[in-house]
């Protein structure tokens, strides 16, 4: 079997790369070790988490908000088994769509673990132990990532679980401790809190989603408190012990108010029936045979140059397994880019403008520089902020939490960063990305007509604030 390109891994990086290679006329193979295509994103990440977030948000609204709209429901309950089944159906449909796309683009799919024999030969080991060999001119590694843990916390997948298990539980936990107040922690905490789980988030930093603009974390915490989630910020988890019925998580309180002495940190124990470990993900390269072709990892990642090429000529890597944000759309963009590079084109990704979204409700979304980053770089900036409660659309929906903040260059008004927490922030951020890609000024956006009433008007009003220190509706 001879191919021009072989892709290892079928997540959003790998399958998109394969499709684009095929579109550009290359004979393409894709290898996936699981029986379904789609990787983390389709099977245990973006798609199932959003499916369950949608279901639980419906329940939450029906329980807490429908009566305000004059809709009265009686005997409301959660059929958790059915909720999980619907999620599984959504995943199945998405994965089936990928099978169709592989066929449509005449991409050969190999099921098994891909491993380098040489830069031009890949062995595919199937579950039954048999091995097929593929000869290939180029290889794209898209093997993604896996959940990581911390010292003292051993994931048993029963009581101490990762996002993968959390998306397929058999029962609604009564109590859940979430280690890590990052993206997964906040999304899954809100998912379970909406259907009655008592959730405690234990986070090392003094804020949720600490890598995003600081104001977002504060507002998100305020909002998630309404779901009765409890927060233990500035707490470093040091261990977790599980038995059949539950788990005890130990942490050190590092906050200024902690009764700690220099050598005796204040210790806190938390108990629950489940503990979700959400402390980040690590690139996955097990059984890939990188040692056979001389690729050495740097900080666990496959090093690549600006053309996504590894130290071995003709071997490329994309997505979660290399540097940069661990996001599906970043992996997809790199999938397109690498196919076009191999085809001799000169594509480009603007890594500064990859949006970041947290699918809590309200949603959180941002693109570009944070205030802290601008301060560090000593770039003088103007700030325009507009609250959702002043938006007619938000008031009509009674979704009034949050704000949109625009940061624009003091010198020339160019938009440098947009940070949103509010209803449909995930969609509103799209306009900010386009505006920034075309290097719009805040005044440009303030003067462009925005349909009324829409959430996008919040962006326009914040731009008014940034450019002229005034908004129309505030
Ligand atoms: P992956 O999707 O991880 O795919 C890699 C594939 O390679 C896997 O299928 C794996 O089985 C296969 N593989 C590995 N080694 C081999 C081998 N040797 N041979 C054959 N196959 C192999 N991102 C977003 O942008 N938006 C979201 O809403 C979002 N939600 C998420 C929610 C959760 C709970 C999680 C865990 C992640 C979420 N992400 C989200 C992150 C997103 O899933 C990843 O960034 C994305 O899947 C990375 O794509 P990838 O192609 O690099 O790798
Ligand atoms: P994360 O990096 O977002 O958050 C991990 C958190 O754990 C950090 O805040 C960190 O301070 C905390 N932590 C680490 N060690 C700790 C300790 N000992 N005690 C207490 N807290 C500790 O990682 P997360 O949430 O696991 O997500 C992994 C990746 O998945 C992210 O990179 C994200 O990009 C991706 N993802 C994206 C989503 C989206 O785009 N909506 C949704 C889910 C995941």
Image (tube, rainbow, N blue to C red):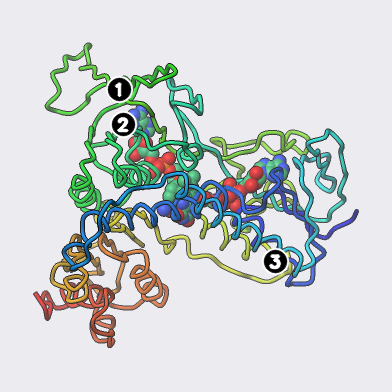
Secondary structure at badge 2 equals strand
Image height of 303 relative to 456, above or below: above
The residue pinned by badge 2 equals 175
Question: Which of pointers 3 and 2 lies earlier in the amino acid sequence?
Answer: 3
- The answer to whether residue 258 is left or right of residue 451 is left
Q: Nearer the viewer, residue 460 or 423?
A: 423
Q: Secondary structure at mark 1?
A: strand
Q: Which residue is mark 3?
A: 101
| Residue on which disc 1 sits | 271
361 or 88, nearer to the observer:
88
Taking the image in four quarters, ligand 2 sits in the one at top left
Mark 2 residue crowding within 10 angstroms, few (<14) / some (14–19) / many (20+): some
- Name the quadrant containing residue 287: top right
User: Is the Cβ of the residue at disc 1 closer than 8 Å to that at disc 2?
Assistant: yes
Q: Position of residue 432 (x, y in %)?
A: 35, 71
Residue 147 drawn above or below residue 58: above
**Residue at image point 17% right, 76% down:** 392
Q: Position of residue 372 (x, y in %)?
A: 25, 52
């Amino acid at each position: 079997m001879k191919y021009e390109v072989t892709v290892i891994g079928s997540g959003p990086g790998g399958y998109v790369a394969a499709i684009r290679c095929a579109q550009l006329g290359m004979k393409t193979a894709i290898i996936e070790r699981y029986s379904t295509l789609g990787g983390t994103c389709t099977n245990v990440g973006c798609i199932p988490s959003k499916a369950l977030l949608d279901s639980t948000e419906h329940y939450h609204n029906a329980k807490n908000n429908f009566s305000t709209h004059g809709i009265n429901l009686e005997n409301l309950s959660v059929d958790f088994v059915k909720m999980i089944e619907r999620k599984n159906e959504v995943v199945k449909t998405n994965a089936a769509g990928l099978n169709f796309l592989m066929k449509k683009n005449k991409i050969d799919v190999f099921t098994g673990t891909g491993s380098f024999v040489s830069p031009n030969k890949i062995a595919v080991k199937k579950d039954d132990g048999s091995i097929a060999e593929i000869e290939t001119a180029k290889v794209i590694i898209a093997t993604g990532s896996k959940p990581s843990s911390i010292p003292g916390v051993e994931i048993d997948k029963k009581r101490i679980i990762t996002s993968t298990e959390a998306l397929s539980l058999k029962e609604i936990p009564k109590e859940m401790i979430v280690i890590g107040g990052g993206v997964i922690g906040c999304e899954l905490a809100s998912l379970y809190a909406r259907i009655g789980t008592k959730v405690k988030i234990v986070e090392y930093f003094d804020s949720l989603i600490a890598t995003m603009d600081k104001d977002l974390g504060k507002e998100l915490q305020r909002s998630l408190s309404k779901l009765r989630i409890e927060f233990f910020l500035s707490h470093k988890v040091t261990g977790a012990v599980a038995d059949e019925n539950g788990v005890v998580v130990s942490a050190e309180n590092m906050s200024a108010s902690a009764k700690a002495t220099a050598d005796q940190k204040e210790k806190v124990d938390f108990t629950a029936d489940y503990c979700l470990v959400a402390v980040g993900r690590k690139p996955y390269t097990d059984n890939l045979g990188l040692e056979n072709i001389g690729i050495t990892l740097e900080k666990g990642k496959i090093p690549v140059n600006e053309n996504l090429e590894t130290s071995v000529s003709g071997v490329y890597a994309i997505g979660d397994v290399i540097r940069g944000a661990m996001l599906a759309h970043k992996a997809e963009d790199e999938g397109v880019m690498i196919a076009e590079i191999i085809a001799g084109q000169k594509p480009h990704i603007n890594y500064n403008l990859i949006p970041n979204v947290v699918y809590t409700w309200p949603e959180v979304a941002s693109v570009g520089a944070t205030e802290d980053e601008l301060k560090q770089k000593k770039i003088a900036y103007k700030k325009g902020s507009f609250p959702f409660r002043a938006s007619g659309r938000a008031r009509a929906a009674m979704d009034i939490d949050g704000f949109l903040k625009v940061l624009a260059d003091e010198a020339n008004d160019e938009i440098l960063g947009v940070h949103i927490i509010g209803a449909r922030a995930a969609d509103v951020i799209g306009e900010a990305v386009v505006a920034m890609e075309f290097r719009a000024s805040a005044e440009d956006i303030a003067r462009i007509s925005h349909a009324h009433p829409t959430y996008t008007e919040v962006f326009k009003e914040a731009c008014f604030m940034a450019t002229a220190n005034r908004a129309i509706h505030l």
